[in-house]
Image (spheres, rainbow, N blue to C red):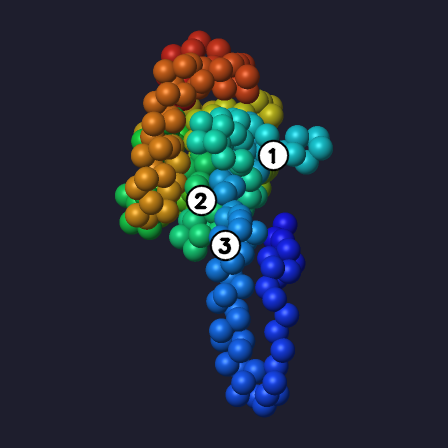
Amino acid sequence: MARFIPCLGLLPPLILTHADSRSVIGMKRFLLPLVASICVLLGCSPKAHDKLIIGMELAYPPFEMTDEKGTPSGVSVDLAQALGKYLGREVQIENTPFDGLIPALKTGKIDLIISSMTATPERARSIDFSDPYLKTGLCLLVGKNSTVQSIQDLDQPGKVVAVKQGTTGHGYAVDHIKQAKLLVLDKESVCVLEVVQGKADAFIYDQMSTYQNWKRNENTTRPLLKPFKEESWAIGVRKGNDELREKVNQFLADFRAKNGFETLGDRHLKEQKEAFRKMGYPFYF
């Protein structure tokens, strides 16, 4: 809390002998800088805001989500807290729609993005990225009885492909799928439902989410987990903030050396790690 009253109390009483507007304005011009200077010297000015504000969309379990009390939790939340501890700064999580994260970073509303964001050349034109901390890839969730076996099978007249707006799956589909109909939706769960109900032939998304969505809908869906496009996730940093980006990279290297990512995987993704190992797919971290 700013405490200006004690500072003002140090000033002697002022007696205005001329009450005309010019003298009052002149006195204010002299007095205000003097008050500010004394307050700064005595340490009574407010402290600068030093929280590390991290944006993420809390709708992507087990990476970004909330617990039963509504508290942010998940892999990315734990990673953010570890970063804050490394930097000696208190972390504040800002729940932000995924397509609003980059604008929020560019306008200074948040300091970093840690939200399972793929580092792409397109995004790198707007923001900077840390070193990659996780590898994944785009794959498919299809109907259980579907004849689709690969991404090539989808680009045909009459096929319907669901994608979540603003994701790399959306971008890939726009660039590569020319004959099938694209169904652009704003929620992952809605995309999955389209496949479950047979309204879409496939949903393009990352490996981990596709695996989880299949496990929730084993009677109606089938996962094609071999990635047709490999990707890396990284932490988003505002353009030009090289000092913070370098500190983030130092943290990531230190965290990896101390098996921090292995710990996160065991804490949040133990079942998935084992399943991917059995299927012969390299795991994330």
Residue closer to the observer: 23 or 206 = 23
Q: In 3D space, how far apart are the residues under numbered discs 1 and 3 (Cα atoms)?
A: 37 Å
Residue type at the position of mark 3: Val
Vertical side of 33 occupied by 117: above or below? above
Residue 60 in view in this figure: no
**Mark 1 burial class by Cα count in 10 Å: few <14, some 14-19, many 20+:** some
Image x and y of residue 67, in percent: 66, 30
| Sequence-wise first label, 3 or 2 | 3
Residue at 53% x, 88% y is 22
Residue 76 as seen in the image, left or right of residue 169: right
Q: Which residue is mark 3?
A: 40
Q: Residue furthest bottom?
A: 20
Vertical side of 275 occupied by 82: above or below? below
Q: Which residue is mark 1?
A: 72
Residue 226 as seen in the image, left or right of residue 25: left
Image x and y of residue 92, in percent: 55, 40
Residue type at the position of mark 2: Asp
**Mark 3 burial class by Cα count in 10 Å: few <14, some 14-19, many 20+:** few
Checking the image for residue 111, the label placed there is 2
Q: Secondary structure at mark 2?
A: loop
Q: Residue furthest right?
A: 69
Image x and y of residue 270, in percent: 53, 14
Image x and y of residue 93, in percent: 55, 39
State which quarter of the image contains the C terminus. Answer: top left
Residue at 70% x, 30% y is 68
Asked if the residue at tag 3 contacts the one at tag 1, i.e. Cβ–Cβ closer than 8 Å, the answer is no
Question: Of circles 1 and 2, which is in front?
Answer: 2
Residue closer to the observer: 60 or 172 = 60
Residue type at the position of mark 1: Pro
Q: Secondary structure at mark 3?
A: helix
Residue 123 as seen in the image, left or right of residue 111: left
Residue closer to the observer: 48 or 115 = 48
